Amino acid sequence: MKIAKSYGYLKKDLDIIEQSLNQVIQAEHTVLRKASTELLQAGGKRIRPVFVLLSGQIGNYNLERIKTAAVSLELIHMATLVHDDVIDDAELRRGKPTIKESYGNRVAMYTGDYILARSLENITKLKNPEVHRVLSRSIVEVCVGEIEQIKYKYNWDQNLRDYLRRIKRKTALLIATSCKLGAIVSGVSESHANKLYLYGYYIGMSYQIIDDILDFTSSSKELGKPAGNDLLQGNLTLPVLYAMEDTEFNDLLRKTFQDPENVSAADLTILLDALKKTNGIEKSFKLSDYYLQKALAVLEDLPNTKAANSLRDIAKFIGKRRS
């Protein structure tokens, strides 16, 4: 079962959001317009707009208002991807050249800034101060998370708390914010809006953990980037953190990355094979499931609606995701 089947009834609304995304990113400057459009056309799961729509369905659903929130959140996500690729010197995203690779670092950074600015301009259509407060706070936290990721690169002495705080800012916050903004815009009660925020947070944590697992268990073709790329970039993810509890793997990791710039493809392959022999991946799946169960528990406190059932289906799908 594909995840989109659980919210197939929203396809027309998602198509409208896609059209709106394309309209909002259009720029007078040729390079900005071309780079932004290429990023949009590269595709994506659009999971943040989905969460905005589903949360909005629990309240007084108004597509025009919901669309504004959904588009702005997806644009913020897109902007962070462009900036991430510059920081990570990434050549591919979803199997296609990154903006950085096609246009260089300077154009990529300005493209990311432009997309973020368009997001903030777009959200001004909504006059609710709470919407702007929640969105602004999330952007601040995402920026802090980006700095933290740079700070911890090639630092093998991190702990679980460091990792969880980082993925909260990297992924979970925007998903949680998507759920909360959809609720606020649709007039959902404060209590239910906060529950939806929690659901989004737990889902986001689980989703990122699964992503980090797939970085080691999927092929380069499936990932659209080299397998083990996060590790090669010096980003310590959960499977590695757990695998480092194995002394032999810990020693091999530190020895391999004594000179990070000279780590070869063969070195990385040996390291990935060694990781798979530890219980790092198994323990990572268990922590992902822990967050999923918390997300499902939160949904029990929400009205039993079609949208809530879709949110439940998404959680179950994420738990089974292997690609």
Image (cartoon, rainbow, N blue to C red):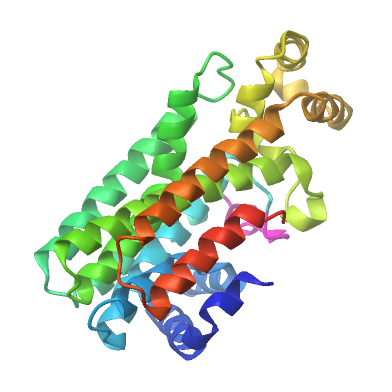
**Camera sees residue 233:** no
Residue at screen point 59% across, 21% down: 154
Residue at screen point 41% across, 41% down: 168
Q: In what quadrant of the picture does the C terminus appear?
A: bottom right
Residue at screen point 57% across, 60% down: 316
* Frontmost residue, 14 versus 25: 14
From this view, report whether residue 81 is shown above or below residue 169: below
Instruction: Say which quarter of the image contains residue 276.
Output: top right
- Residue 125 rendering spot, x and y as whole percentages: 19, 78
From this view, report whether residue 110 is shown above or below residue 119: above
Which span is picked out in magenta?
Answer: 93-104
Residue at screen point 54% across, 13% down: 157
Residue 13 part of the magenta-drawn span:
no
Q: Is residue 226 left or right of residue 76?
A: right
- Residue 132 rendering spot, x and y as whole percentages: 18, 61
Residue 94 part of the magenta-drawn span:
yes
Q: In what quadrant of the picture does the N terminus appear?
A: bottom right
- Residue 258 rendering spot, x and y as whole percentages: 71, 12
- Residue 321 rendering spot, x and y as whole percentages: 67, 56
